[in-house]
Image (tube, helix red, strand yellow):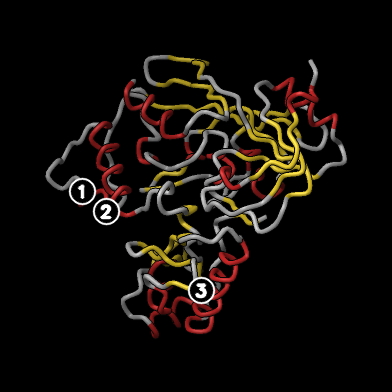
Amino acid sequence: MNIQHNIKHNIQLKPYNSLRTQALAKLFCEPQSIDELSEIIKKYPDEKKLVLGGGFNLFFTKDFDGLIVHQNMKGINIWYEDANFIEIEVNAAESWDDFVEFCVANNYAGIENLSLIPSTVGAAPIQNIGAYGTEVKDVITLVRTVDIRTGESKDFTNEMCDFGYRDSIFKRTGNYVITSVVFRLKKHFTYKEKYVDLTNELKKNKYPTMREVREAIVRIRTRKLPDYHTLPNAGSFFKNPYLTYEQKENLIQLLPNATIHNINENCFKTSSAFLIDKAGYKNKRSGMVGTYEHHSLIIINYGTEKGKDIVNFMKQIQHNVHSQFNIWLEPEVRMY
């Protein structure tokens, strides 16, 4: 194999991030097999490396002086199946929502609440994607990777992934290229009310099918969220913050109608979108960057190619929320 033919130089990364910021990658590759990926990593041991999936949860503020690995491995294989469960290995470059549709069409239950999340399968465990009362960690049994430092293969059990809220060992270290994910799904679907928006959407349907749940979530997300093709964005920009008891009490004093979720007796969670609205950033623009008119948790790029413009707007929001409510919003989106 002549690896040199698979390496491109000075590639524009604007098409590879959904916020459409400009940056050049010194080196760029699209490996189609584990062997090819491993060989490329070993060929460039000293280059800084970054893995790109669909580019829906990151953007660039400057040129990338290193090797971009843009995953291109596809395929779906059934590992194991019995009367109640099925285990499916899905390669990392598969579209997440296409995989959800595949599961719904075959009556494999467990990820229907994660419909219409723009992602690749390989990106799903990195972010531990979640929506409507479901997190992807609940159905993952194995994540197969290649170590980006050595080119060696390594498998991670669910426990080894160290999943957290929109977090994992893969996100924290950046040391692994995910090549495939194994999911354990149920072959029988039972609807459970978990999330008020979904309950309201399905209020006329007490016993919805999995297909009806997926279609309801697609409708909700389509109403709430902008199409990144026409309004470049990276989805939810901030995590919903966890609060101490003192922060929770202070917030209730300032905003009596704040939504508070009890995690435990000393830990609480509230809505970033609500805080952003109350801080004065509902449908707010600064130059070519602003919050989405229908959902303040989403930052829209209205025409800038500079990632630093988005960072500056993010910092405005963070400082205003902090100064008013003593709560610091952590970005969910990664910046390079």
Q: Can you tell which quarter of the image residue 304 is in?
A: bottom right
Badges 3 and 1: C-beta atoms under 8 Å apart? no
The image shows residue 54 at horizontal and vertical percentages of 54, 39
Q: Earlier in the sequence, mark 2 or mark 3?
A: 2
The residue where tag 2 is placed is 197
Which amino acid is tagged 2? Asp
The residue where tag 3 is placed is 317
Residue 85 in view in this figure: yes
The image shows residue 50 at horizontal and vertical percentages of 71, 43
Badge 1 crowding class, 10 Å Cα cut-off, few under 14, some 14 to 19, many 20 or more, is: some
Q: How far apart are marks 1 and 2 (CA)?
A: 6 Å
The image shows residue 189 at horizontal and vertical percentages of 30, 29
Q: Earlier in the sequence, mark 3 or mark 1?
A: 1
The image shows residue 109 at horizontal and vertical percentages of 36, 29
For the C terminus, the quadrant is: bottom right
Using the image, determine if residue 301 lies above or below residue 186: below
Q: Is mark 1 on a helix, strand or loop?
A: helix
Q: Can you tell which quarter of the image residue 2 is in?
A: top right
Q: Which of marks 2 and 3 is in front?
A: 3
The residue where tag 1 is placed is 201
Closer to the camera, 85 or 73? 73
Q: Is mark 2 on a helix, strand or loop?
A: helix
Badge 2 crowding class, 10 Å Cα cut-off, few under 14, some 14 to 19, many 20 or more, is: few
Q: Can you tell which quarter of the image residue 285 is in?
A: bottom left
Which amino acid is tagged 3? Ile
Residue located at (36% from left, 40% from top): 113
